[in-house]
Amino acid sequence: MSSSSNKDSFSSKWGLIFAAAGSAIGLGNIWLFPYRVGELGGAAFLIPYITCVIVLGITALIGEITIGRLTGTGPIGAFKKALEMRGKKGKLGETIGWICVLVALVQAIGYTLIVAWVVRFLADSIIGPAFTTSDSTRYYNMAINDKIILWITVTVILSGSINSKKKVIEKCCKLMIPAIIVLFFVLIIRVAFLPHASEGYKYLFTPRWECLINPTTWMLALGQVFYSLSLRGSTMIVYGSYSKKSDDIVSSAKNIVFLDTLASIMAAMLIIPAVFAFGKDINSGPPLMFITMPEIFKCLALGQILMVIFFIAVFFAALTSLIGMIETIVELLQNKFKIPRTWAIVSVCTTIILMCNIFIVGQIRGFINILEMHLIPICTLFSAIFLFWVVPSSNVIGEIQSGRSKPVGKWIIYAGRYVLCSIIIIIYILNVTK
């Protein structure tokens, strides 16, 4: 059995926490979460979201990090080894691992397109056009189509450069994650003083019970948790394989979930009150970040500076998530096909640039819905089944106990088997049969 101790690991537990939090904190927090909160009734979405985070998110995250560190490899090797530990052939595990990796690749392709828009808007916020234009809708339609391949290429090159070494990933995430929190805090303080911002807070924290009893709300909350935490049976397994045996997995998972949830709540507390203060549409989808927020900044004193701060925070969040998706594929090429890291990164980046051509603006929302409601929960279910049902319980508890002073106990096995797996299946069936 190979282990993470034989590989180039993160330098400390905070390397794992910030790298994993970097993968988790992204556009799912800053754009998708406020949009879901607005669409699905404020606190009526917050309640199932926080419930799913506590009951399912932490357990799923512990599971993915654990199976990665236990096997010392990414999903294809991890699922294969899990079956072999039961004395079975690992072919089925490899096949399921491939599915999870392909989902990560597809997500990276669609995600890159949106990150490229962020890079374009950040550059134009600094130079001026994104702020000075009189028609934000027209500018948005132009910006997301004009020279988009150029901006996609710039985005992928930036991401690939950071992926050049694991230590670079670690250092960048340690810098960017605290920066995101600080930048959001500055913007939240400014928005709090806007007229009618209180209406946004009221909407955010007042539940609409008719939305709460809708199975779709719960499915979207579950999908949002998995999407936001990068739980898709791939990236967190890879990062787990880079962690040291001395790292406390349970403590790390709690810190990652805390940082991710904090970023989501801060994004909602920034965007929703701002939207209410200026009478904008909270259900505007992708334009929420690229049309609505720029229009709001134009109405504020020092608006261009605030716009630049906003898009820097969005850029940091988006980039760290894309890094995690790319690393999933790079790890596969390195370990499965023995391709040198540099060439693996070049291959992945080239593929993403070429494949981005198949996505257009109108497909993005439907594309994210398919990922969020179908592919990501299924891949998360796969990883939970392999760890909590296939790998012997003694191995699971022993791996989690490594680096932890307090005893783990079998609660984690029961939580993974009977709570995590069962609820994913139940909510998924209710959603597809409604």
Image (tube, rainbow, N blue to C red):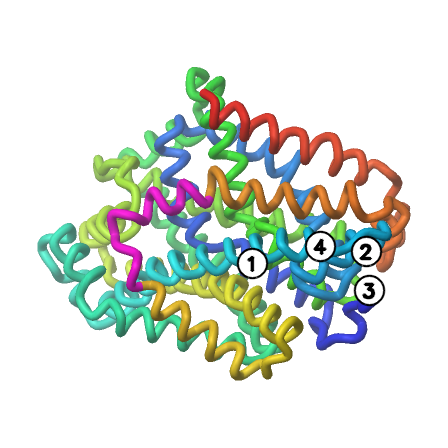
* Circles 1 and 4 in contact, beta carbons < 8 Å: no
- Which circle's residue, 2 or 1, is located before the other in the chain? 2
Badge 1 element:
helix
Mark 2 to mark 1 CA distance (whole Å):
20 Å
Identified by mark 4, the residue type is Phe
Badge 3 element:
loop
Estimate how packed mark 2 is, as few (under 14), some (14 to 19) or many (20 or more) residues with alpha carbons within 10 Å: some
Estimate how packed mark 1 is, as few (under 14), some (14 to 19) or many (20 or more) residues with alpha carbons within 10 Å: many
- Which circle's residue, 4 or 2, is located before the other in the chain? 4
**Magenta residue check for 364:** yes
* Circles 2 and 3 in contact, beta carbons < 8 Å: no
Identified by mark 3, the residue type is Lys
Residue at 75% from the left image edge and 54% from the top image edge: 66
Residue 324 sits in quarter: bottom right
Give the residue pinned by disc 3: 245
Q: Residue 159: x percent and y percent?
A: 45, 72
Camera-side residue of 242 and 367? 367
- Which circle's residue, 1 or 3, is located before the other in the chain? 1
Q: Which mark is residue 84?
A: 2
* Circles 4 and 3 in contact, beta carbons < 8 Å: no
Q: Which mark is residue 101?
A: 1
Compared with 14, 107 (above or below) is above
Tag nearer the camera, 2 or 3 = 2
- Which circle's residue, 4 or 3, is located before the other in the chain? 4
Mark 4 to mark 3 CA distance (whole Å):
20 Å
Identified by mark 1, the residue type is Val
Mark 4 to mark 2 CA distance (whole Å):
9 Å
Q: Residue 86: x percent and y percent?
A: 85, 50
Magenta segment boundaries in residue numbering? 357-371
Compared with 386, 426 (above or below) is above
Give the residue pinned by disc 4: 79
